Image (spheres, rainbow, N blue to C red):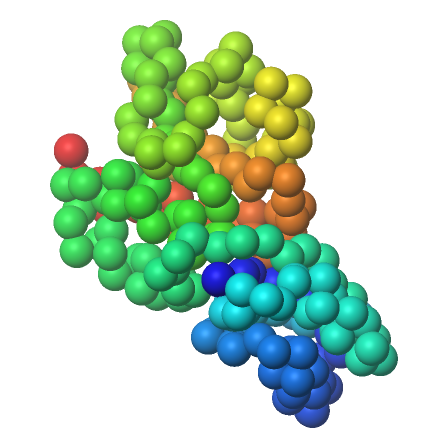
């Protein structure tokens, strides 16, 4: 079974190796590691994609991590079978290759690039809010969607009670008098969106909107 582990550790030589050794010793098979955020405090947040045998519970990985000095586990959950950590450059190449469908391609790559459960692009033309593109598992629109179109910067959104503890973030892609476009993403149960993730999302959405040809 595939799991995604988000872990914070000291940004010093040897820390990542010690983490990999601890996870391997607990029975995990590491598939990929990606840096999510480097902090001014001298710490780093990493996402680790790994495979666990059916007999092994994810709690064993948390225990193994917490035995290491200075290591904190932010979150661990099941990950879609066959999924891979996707780098930002690969995502950009995806939507710039088809500029006429850049926003749709962006929405398609967001879940794997940012480890979200879903993404959607909303736009407002002549006062009407509609879904431009969305992931298959994205929820139906709620009244709050109207206020999302008013945001001016990438930000974390308040949770929607009906969406069962889904953490949300959004960013404007276009903000013109005649047309507004915003990208909204969600994770069921966490982890919370880091400031660096929100900033990356904003930059990528702006780029996709700028190359969209139709």
Query: From where the camera sits, is residue 200 visible?
Result: no
Most extreme residue toward the bottom is 14
Name of the residue lying farthest toward the front: 55
The location of residue 202, given as percent across then percent down, is 47, 45
Counting every numbered tag in the picture gives 0
Specify whether 180 is left or right of 58.
Answer: left
102 sits to left or right of 150 = left
Residue sitting at x 31%, y 58% = 92
Query: What residue do we see at 53% from left, 31% from top?
Result: 152
* Of residues 99 and 3, the one drawn nearer to the viewer in this rendering: 3
The location of residue 155, given as percent across then percent down, is 60, 38
The furthest residue to the top: 127
* One can see residue 125 in this view: yes
Q: Quadrant of the C terminus?
A: top left
Relative image position of residue 207 (x, y in whole percent): 34, 49
Residue sitting nearer the eye, 4 or 201: 4
Residue 18, quarter of the rendered image: bottom right
Question: Would you identify the image quadrant in which residue 62 lies?
Answer: bottom right
For the point 71% across and 68% down, the residue is 60
Q: Position of residue 175 (x, y in %)?
A: 41, 28
What residue lies at 53% left-to-right and 70% top-to-bottom? 53
Q: Is residue 112 above or below residue 13?
A: above
């Amino acid at each position: 079974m595939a799991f995604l582990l988000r872990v914070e550790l000291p940004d010093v030589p040897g820390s990542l190796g010690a983490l990999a050794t601890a996870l391997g010793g607990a029975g995990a098979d590491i598939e990929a590691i990606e840096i999510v955020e480097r902090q001014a405090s001298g710490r780093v947040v990493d996402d680790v994609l790994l495979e666990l045998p059916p007999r092994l519970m994810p709690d064993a990985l948390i225990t193994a991590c917490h035995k290491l000095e200075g290591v904190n586990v932010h979150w661990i959950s099941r990950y879609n079978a066959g999924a891979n950590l996707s780098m930002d450059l690969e995502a950009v190449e995806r939507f710039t290759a088809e500029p006429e469908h850049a926003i749709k391609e962006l929405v398609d790559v967001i879940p794997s690039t940012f480890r979200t459960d879903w993404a959607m692009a909303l736009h407002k033309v002549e006062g009407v809010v509609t879904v431009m593109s969305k992931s298959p598992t994205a929820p139906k629109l709620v009244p709050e969607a109207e206020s999302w179109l008013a945001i001016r910067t990438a930000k974390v959104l308040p949770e929607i009670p009906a969406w069962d503890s889904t953490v949300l973030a959004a960013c404007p892609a276009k903000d013109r008098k005649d047309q507004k476009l915003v990208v909204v993403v969600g994770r069921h149960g966490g982890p919370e969106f880091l400031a660096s993730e929100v900033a990356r999302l904003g930059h990528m959405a702006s780029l996709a909107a700028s190359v969209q040809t139709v």
